[in-house]
Image (cartoon, rainbow, N blue to C red):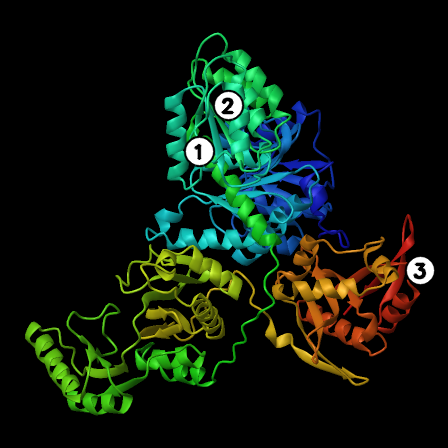
């Protein structure tokens, strides 16, 4: 029997004051008990903030029931146990595990990990105890401390989502390291990671991605998903640790160029080679900076090569301090090779000068006999030190990637939105192809065309004679292709003829194809022809969409015309795409150089390519029946694009599509409102609304801004506008009212779900003064309340200044009750049960 009314509180669970322990006589239990005694703590005899379950597997269900009956609402299960999720639901208790390695807090080890790291500002969340031990073993000598270490284990109940939500609010945590084995709910993980990464750096390691998918597509998909969330994915444990080192100890980069200073010319050149191999540009010194350095060195430094120095041991530090103010330098790498007795003095000089340097300072101290001690000294002083220049450069690369992520997050997207109004014939075409399980050539191109993507004019033909007649109808020149449902994606050699100028050429080509393939034994029974208008000369591109078992649909983009089974050359992104995301996908693909102007040829139409990617993304979202889609070739040229070949495979009937990791735009929530001669479109907010949203707040009088933000706010920061408009539709909703006559945003209502269980949510609303008195505010609130109800939100709350009389009157009319907030005489809370 559980105690009713007591709720799970993540803050008390993850930073418990009282701890219960069951299974104290087992080996695991003895270990936890010893750790508690070492921290001068004793297990709580009854209800506790957290229970550690160290029982043998057979005793775990009874132990969980006993803890829950006493009122404990959170538990960590250290060993293996079946059906923990069901146990959690049955007993109203949240469980971390099975096989969790426990939790470590500063001064309190509630884990199976043998060592307790020093306290610090980094949090580690993961599933592998062995990897956690390795991280701790690295952290202790490098003086990296931890705010919290949490073992997810088997992820049966409490998973990454809830833990990341907690750490994103934890005032003791400045950066988060995440080791991922398997995700139970990728969408929940993504939403929580996105929320956390907006507040602090998040670095991830996902072992086994290439092992599970040698093509690299899975890893590219995970990297794309994490990048959309603002998380930095690393590939090796060395990168994982280097990223944690740099993101927690090094200042943010000012630019992407690196200045290298070394006490050895050879070591400096090796570092420069390593930087260039990683596409990191070497800083080019301005004449003014070069003159300052020359005065210090007594010789003119190379304009962009490494600077090698000789002389006093303190010279490395002095030169770093001289270079740091130069605007052309994004970061500084110091490479130190052993020289002798003065090395210690060089380290002390670096420690002293680091306090004055405002850009990233990374130090590679080579060697072990003396180098290890020097690195330890630098680490103790809080500097980022590395064994090799390559490791330091990897750290700088992580800083650059983090800078790019944050720059992208701060960038206001263009207001342009691609309107997609597909022809309903696409659904009918796919339904008709269900028995065959696929659509090829003309049928697949018909579906593509229904999404307003230009396709080559095509006609099916049964014989070479029919093909000649169809070609005359289409207009010359044409392409003739053999067509068959079982035709391999990469086509049979000799089954296509290009640039056919007239009907006789088409007829002759058709007979030649049939004869050639028949003689080779490659002619498929029942094969026919497809006649297509010859596409304009352009760059061949490929768009490929297919399911990933964990991430759902992925969209690949790259060069066309190659091996259809080779996906390694495609840049990967997740739907939904907008124009900005599509353009970024194009820019990082291997096809990008071919699309730029070169050798006298004009640049391809990037906007048309981006629009095609957005339309394919929408097609994949709209049609869950699609298992895979291949558009190859898609020809791109100066004035647009045209698709020449396509294949769509359908999933077996009754097989559901894996859930989308990123929630698509909820267009179904769009509605219209009209009052007092004013017409408004009510719809979910989009990132492209940023400028209009900022303009809305600029029209608020000072009193409205005080009521809305509880302080005298004059102008909304760009970062806050972005957070308001680029939202996670799985976690929150904002409905905006758009004036139909001019596109202005006239109001917005917002509902943010509680990130622990989603059962409660907080509202906010703001209305343009010119729209007050129209009933628009009530319409927006009703829309947002209806959304909350559809998401099983059971309580909606909002805090209101007690002198905001108009708001209090308005909210009461909507059915909210008003309650005083203890200790806050100026604030009241409004509550509604939808």
Q: Which one is nearer the viewer's eye here, 289 or 84?
A: 289
**How crowded is the residue under tag 3: few (<14 C-alpha within 10 Å), some, or many (20+)?**
few
Of the residues under marks 3 and 2, which one precedes in the sequence? 2
Kindly identify which numbered label has been placed on residue 485. none
Judge whether residue 381 can be spotted in this image.
no
Could you tell me which secondary element the residue under label 3 belongs to? loop
Q: Which one is nearer the viewer's eye here, 363 or 504?
A: 504
Residue, far top: 341
Residue 442: image quadrant is bottom left
179 horizontally vs 758: left or right: left
Cβ atoms at labels 2 and 1 below 8 Å apart: no
Could you tell me which secondary element the residue under label 2 belongs to? helix
Q: Is residue 783 above or below residue 820?
A: below
Image location (x, y in percent) of residue 596: 39, 60
**Which residue appears at 37% of the width and 65% of the height?**
602
Residue 274: image quadrant is top left
Image location (x, y in percent) of residue 219: 41, 51
- Residue that mark 1 sits on: 304
Of the residues under marks 2 and 1, which one precedes in the sequence? 2
40 horizontally vs 601: left or right: right
Q: Is residue 804 above or below residue 649?
A: above
- Residue that mark 3 sits on: 803
Residue 690: image quadrant is bottom right
- Residue that mark 2 sits on: 294
Residue, far left: 519
Image location (x, y in percent) of residue 805: 93, 65
Separation of disc 2 and disc 1 at Cα? Answer: 14 Å
Q: Which one is nearer the viewer's eye here, 319 or 551?
A: 319
- Between label 2 and label 1, give the one nearer the viewer: 2
């Amino acid at each position: 029997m559980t105690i009713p009314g007591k709720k799970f509180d993540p803050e008390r669970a993850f930073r418990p004051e009282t701890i219960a322990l069951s299974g104290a006589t087992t080996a695991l239990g003895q270990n936890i008990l010893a750790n508690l005694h070492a921290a001068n703590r004793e297990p709580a005899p009854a209800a506790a903030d957290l229970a550690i379950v160290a029982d043998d597997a057979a005793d775990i269900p009874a132990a969980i029931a006993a803890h829950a009956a006493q009122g404990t609402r959170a538990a960590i299960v250290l060993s293996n146990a079946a059906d923990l999720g069901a146990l959690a639901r049955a007993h109203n208790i949240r469980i971390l595990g099975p096989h969790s390695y426990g939790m470590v807090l500063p001064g309190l080890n509630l884990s199976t990990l043998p060592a307790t790291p020093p306290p610090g500002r980094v949090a580690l969340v993961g599933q592998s105890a062995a990897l956690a031990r390795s991280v701790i073993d690295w952290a202790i000598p490098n003086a990296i401390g931890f705010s919290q270490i949490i073992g997810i284990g088997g992820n049966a109940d409490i998973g990454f989502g809830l833990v990341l939500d907690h750490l994103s609010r934890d005032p003791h945590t400045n950066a988060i390291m995440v080791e991922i084995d398997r995700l139970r709910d990728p969408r929940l993980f993504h939403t929580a990671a996105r929320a956390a990464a907006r507040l602090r750096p998040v670095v991830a390691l996902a072992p086994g991605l290439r092992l599970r998918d040698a093509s690299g597509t899975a890893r590219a998909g995970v990297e794309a998903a994490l990048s959309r969330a603002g998380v930095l994915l690393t590939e090796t444990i060395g990168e994982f640790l280097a990223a944690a080192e740099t993101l927690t100890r090094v200042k943010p980069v000012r630019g992407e160029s690196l200045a290298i200073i070394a006490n050895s010319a050879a070591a400096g050149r090796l570092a420069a080679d390593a930087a260039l191999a990683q596409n990191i540009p070497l800083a080019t010194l301005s004449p003014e900076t070069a003159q300052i350095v020359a005065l210090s060195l007594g010789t003119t430094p190379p304009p962009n090569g490494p600077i090698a120095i000789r002389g006093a041991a303190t010279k490395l530090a002095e030169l770093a301090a001289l270079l740091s103010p130069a605007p052309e330098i994004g970061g500084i790498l110091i490479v130190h090779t052993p020289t002798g007795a003065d090395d210690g003095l060089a380290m002390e000089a670096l420690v002293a000068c680091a306090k004055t340097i405002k850009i990233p300072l990374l130090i590679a101290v080579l060697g072990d006999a003396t180098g290890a001690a020097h690195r330890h000294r630098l680490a103790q002083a809080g500097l980022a030190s590395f064994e090799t220049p390559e490791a330091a450069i990897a750290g700088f690369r992580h800083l650059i990637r983090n800078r790019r992520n944050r720059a992208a997050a701060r960038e206001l997207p263009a207001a342009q939105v691609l309107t997609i109004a597909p022809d309903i014939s696409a659904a009918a075409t796919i339904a008709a192809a269900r028995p065959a399980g696929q659509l090829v050539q003309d049928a697949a191109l018909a579906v593509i065309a229904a999404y307003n993507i230009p396709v080559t004019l095509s006609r099916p033909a049964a014989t070479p004679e029919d093909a000649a007649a169809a070609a005359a109808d289409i207009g010359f020149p044409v392409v003739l292709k053999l067509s068959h449902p079982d035709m391999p994606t990469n086509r049979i050699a000799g089954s296509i003829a290009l640039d056919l100028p007239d009907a006789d050429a088409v007829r002759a080509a058709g007979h030649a194809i049939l004869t050639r393939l028949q003689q080779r034994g490659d002619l498929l029974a029942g094969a026919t022809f497809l006649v297509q208008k010859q596409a304009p000369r352009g760059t061949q591109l490929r768009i490929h969409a297919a399911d990933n078992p964990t991430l759902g649909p992925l969209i690949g983009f790259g060069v066309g015309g190659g091996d259809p089974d080779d996906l390694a050359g495609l840049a990967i992104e997740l739907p939904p795409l907008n124009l900005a995301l599509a353009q970024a996908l194009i820019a990082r693909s291997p096809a990008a150089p071919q699309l730029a102007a070169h050798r006298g040829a004009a640049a391809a139409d990037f906007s048309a390519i981006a629009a095609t990617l957005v339309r394919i993304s929408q097609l994949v979202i709209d049609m869950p029946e699609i298992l895979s889609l291949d558009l190859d070739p898609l020809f791109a040229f100066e004035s647009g694009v045209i698709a020449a070949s396509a294949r769509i495979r359908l999933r077996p009937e009754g097989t559901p599509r894996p859930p989308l990791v990123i929630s698509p735009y909820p267009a179904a929530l769009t509605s219209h409102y009209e009052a007092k001669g004013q017409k408004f479109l009510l719809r979910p907010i989009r990132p492209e609304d940023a400028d209009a949203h900022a303009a809305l707040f600029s029209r608020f009088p000072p009193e409205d801004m005080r009521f809305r933000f509880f302080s005298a706010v004059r102008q909304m920061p760009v970062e806050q506008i972005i957070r308001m408009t680029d939202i996670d539709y799985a976690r929150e909703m904002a409905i905006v009212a758009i004036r139909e006559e001019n596109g202005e945003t006239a109001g917005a209502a917002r509902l943010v779900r509680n990130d622990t269980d989603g059962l409660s949510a907080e509202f906010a609303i703001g209305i343009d003064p010119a729209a007050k008195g129209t009933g628009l505010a009530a319409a927006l609130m009703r829309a947002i309340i209806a959304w909350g109800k559809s998401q099983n939100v059971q309580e909606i709350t909002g805090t209101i200044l007690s002198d905001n009389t108009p708001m209090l009157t308005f909210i009461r009319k909507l059915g909210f009750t008003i309650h005083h907030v203890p200790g806050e005489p100026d604030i009241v809370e409004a509550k509604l049960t939808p």
